[in-house]
Image (cartoon, coloured by chain):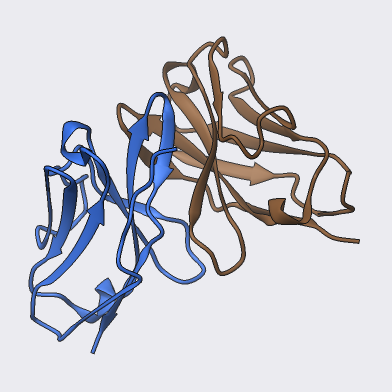
Chain colours: A blue, B brown
């Protein structure tokens, strides 16, 4: 079965740029989405189809996808961005999530 | 858009549970829908998808043959019938709308606990 691999944790200082990677075989050949989940809340879509931001998501969130790696980038990271982030892709009609990355802003 | 799940409760191993999701604020029959679960302290796991008219369904291997996803477009509702439940099925189950290739709206979730 298809697998997506994320680093368990990423730390960033306020105002700096955070990058969270998601790796999978030929991931660049399919669309990747990213979800933010804060404690006790439901996930929220922050990036879809590799690079697009839904309405209401700040411009500091951006995405890319090429080769075997998709990347979520948060520029000028703020304390409110501290959360778990999950990548997601499709494989033959089934959805796959990465294991999640905890972003710590310190 | 609003998705409200219900039906989660404590059930014994081997038992059954039926989860429901009431959808509002959008034309339900025009969207694929999905169930995604999250075990306590763990990550997200996709469970099942259903197409717009309910004729096409997909399942993760671990639930295939035990769970059944269904929908009632007349009542704007999505369901998940869960049979032969195991301890590892304990999770918050989210009802999720699918827009193109992404899960664009999530419900608040309902907790199903499988334990003796």
Observer-nearest of B52 and A17 = A17
Question: In the current view of this chain or complex, which residue is farthest to the bottom?
Answer: A106
Quadrant where the N terminus of chain B sits is top left
Is the residue B21 above or below the residue A56 in the image? above
Which picture quadrant has residue B27? Answer: top left
Q: How many marks?
A: 0
Please state the horizontal and vertical placement of residue B26, each as a whole percent of the image: 42, 28
Quadrant where the C terminus of chain B sits is bottom right
Residue under the image location 74 percent in, 50 percent down: B8
Please state the horizontal and vertical placement of residue B90, each as a whole percent of the image: 71, 56
Is the residue B28 above or below the residue A61 in the image? above
Residue under the image location 68 percent in, 36 percent down: B20
Please state the horizontal and vertical placement of residue B12, each as a whole percent of the image: 90, 53
Is the residue A94 above or below the residue A87 in the image? above
Please state the horizontal and vertical placement of residue A53, each as a whole percent of the image: 17, 47
Is the residue A35 above or below the residue B17 in the image? below
Observer-nearest of A65 and B21 = A65
Residue under the image location 27 percent in, 46 percent down: A24
Residue under the image location 88 percent in, 44 percent down: B14
**In this picture, residue B26 sits left or right of residue B115:** left
**In this picture, residue A8 sits left or right of residue B77:** left
């Amino acid at each position: 079965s298809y697998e997506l691999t994320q680093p368990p944790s990423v730390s960033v200082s306020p105002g700096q740029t955070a990058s969270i990677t998601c790796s999978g075989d030929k991931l660049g050949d399919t669309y990747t989405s990213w979800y933010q989940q804060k404690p006790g809340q439901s996930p929220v879509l922050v990036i879809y189809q590799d690079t697009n931001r839904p309405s209401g998501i700040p411009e500091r969130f951006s995405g890319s996808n090429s080769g075997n790696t998709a990347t979520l980038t948060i520029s000028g990271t703020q304390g409110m961005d501290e959360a778990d982030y999950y990548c997601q892709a499709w494989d033959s009609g089934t959805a796959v999530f990465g294991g999640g990355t905890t972003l710590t802003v310190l | 858009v609003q998705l409200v799940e219900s039906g989660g409760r404590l059930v014994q191993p081997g038992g059954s549970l039926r989860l429901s999701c009431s959808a509002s604020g959008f034309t339900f029959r025009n969207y694929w829908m999905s169930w995604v679960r999250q075990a306590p302290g763990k990550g997200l796991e996709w469970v099942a998808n259903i197409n717009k008219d309910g004729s096409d369904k997909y399942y993760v291997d671990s639930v295939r043959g035990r769970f059944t996803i269904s929908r009632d477009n007349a009542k704007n509702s999505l369901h998940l019938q869960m049979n032969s439940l195991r301890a590892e099925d304990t999770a918050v189950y989210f009802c999720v709308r699918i827009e193109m290739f992404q899960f664009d709206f999530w419900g608040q979730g309902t907790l199903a606990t499988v334990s003796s």
